[in-house]
Amino acid sequence: MAISPTEFETLYRANAADILSYLRRRGAGDDAQDLLSETFLVAWRRREALPAPDLQRAWLFSTARRLRLAHHRQHQPTPGLTDTAAAPSRDTPTDTAANDAVHAALAKLNETDRELLTLTIWEGLTPSEAAAAIGLTAPAARVRLHRARRRLATDPTLAAHHDHDRPNPATLAIVQQPG
């Protein structure tokens, strides 16, 4: 069943800013607005096939991710480039050394685990939404998140920036399990 123009506008208003932030943090730069428009154009064209309302946000992130990766491949054909978060967000460390430590630690994870962590921590998706965005089952995503956080909790790069008396909130957010 297709969503109405009013429902689509509500979907856009509720998610556009978050999708744009996601695209910017992933290095889309000047093309982020175009990729945002393309994401919602795909949603409009596929409005008859959109998932249930509780999965639409995840579907939008998945679409934005695929478009960003395709755009990256088209404009950056250099072999060996990886899909990493490009710029810190409001939830990443503000001091450069801690920021570099978080990015270095994240770079040690495989692409799927890194994307799961950043979608849940920086983009605010639930583990189930992040799973849907990446194409995993919710249980598989929860296991992968747990293991990735455990690996990061023992990463010496992050440990150097994690003072247990005054922990850095951003490094804590990366390694702590949700309550």
Image: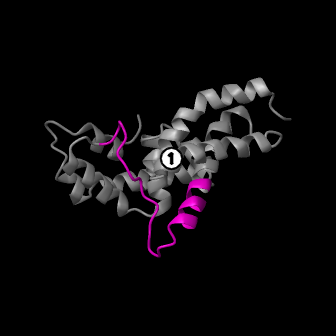
Identify the residue shown where x is 21% and y is 43%: 95
- Asked if residue 104 lies left or right of residue 3, the reply is left
Colouring convention used in this rendered image of the protein: one colour
- Placement of the N terminus among the 4 image quadrants: top right
Identify the residue shown where x is 28% and y is 44%: 171
Identify the residue shown where x is 59% and y is 42%: 129
- Asked if residue 145 lies left or right of residue 7, the reply is left
Give percent across and percent down for residue 54. Answer: 67, 33
Report the predominant secondary structure element of the magenta stretch.
Answer: loop
Q: Nearer the viewer, residue 142 or 117?
A: 117
- Asked if residue 53 lies left or right of residue 19, the reply is right
Q: Quadrant of residue 13?
A: top right
Q: Look at the image and tell me whether residue 59 can be seen.
A: no
Q: Nearer the viewer, residue 97 or 116?
A: 97
Q: Which residue is outermost to the right?
A: 1
| Residue at the spot of label 1 | 23
Give percent across and percent down for residue 40. Answer: 68, 41
Give the secondary structure at mark 1: helix
Residue 88 belongs to the span the image colors magenta: yes
Q: Nearer the viewer, residue 40 or 107?
A: 40
Identify the residue shown where x is 62% and y is 52%: 137
- Which segment is the magenta one? 67-92
Q: Which residue is outermost to the front?
A: 30
Q: Amino acid at mark 1?
A: Leu
Q: Look at the image and tell me whether residue 69 can be seen.
A: yes
Q: Nearer the viewer, residue 104 or 32?
A: 32
- Placement of the C terminus among the 4 image quadrants: top left
Residue 165 belongs to the span the image colors magenta: no
Give the class, few, some or many, for how many residues have Cα within 10 Å of label 1's Cα (few <14, many ≥20).
Answer: many
Give percent across and percent down for residue 47. Answer: 79, 39
On screen, residue 37 above or below 158: above
